[in-house]
Amino acid sequence: MARTIPVYPPEFKVEAVHLVHQGERSVARIANDLGVSEQTLRNWVKHIEIDSGVRAGLTTEERDELRRLRRENRILTQERDILKKAAAFFARESNPIR
């Protein structure tokens, strides 16, 4: 059976990070109380701190753009390679060696 990854609403994540920033309880305790893994909660804290400019790193928007640009680059590279092969094929066809 395949494992499913639960999807938490953004409001839940923000509130969880807010609890961490309050500092009244440990990250492990908050994670346990909320029913998420400690590492998941730490990742949420990291991402929200990056998005808010508190911590250095790629923001969510920048990561999404980078992912989109890499995908586009991969497609364009494949298209270029196909066109190179087609051009070489047609060049051989139009200039047969006698």
Image (spheres, helix red, strand yellow):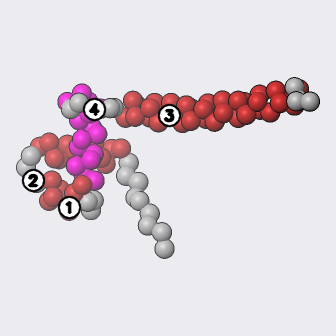
Residue 45, quarter of picture: top left
For marks 3 and 2, give the CA distance: 40 Å
Q: Earlier in the sequence, mark 3 or mark 1?
A: 1
Residue 46, quarter of picture: top left
Q: Residues within 10 Å of mark 1 (few under 14, many from 20)?
A: few
For marks 2 and 1, give the CA distance: 10 Å
What element does badge 1 sit on? helix
Q: Earlier in the sequence, mark 2 or mark 1?
A: 2
**Residue that numbered label 1 is attached to:** 33
Q: Earlier in the sequence, mark 4 or mark 1?
A: 1
Q: Residue at x 17, y 47 (%)?
A: 19
Q: Residues within 10 Å of mark 3 (few under 14, many from 20)?
A: few
Name the residue nearer the viewer: 78 or 68.
Answer: 78
Residue 68 lies in the magenta stretch: no
Q: Residue at x 83, y 30 (%)?
A: 92
**Segment colored magenta:** 40-54
Q: Residues within 10 Å of mark 2 (few under 14, many from 20)?
A: few
**Residue that numbered label 2 is attached to:** 25
Q: Earlier in the sequence, mark 3 or mark 2?
A: 2
Q: Which mark is residue 70?
A: 3
Image location (x, y in percent) of residue 31: 21, 57
| Residue 31 visible (yes or no) | yes
Q: Earlier in the sequence, mark 3 or mark 4?
A: 4
What's the amino acid at mark 3? Arg
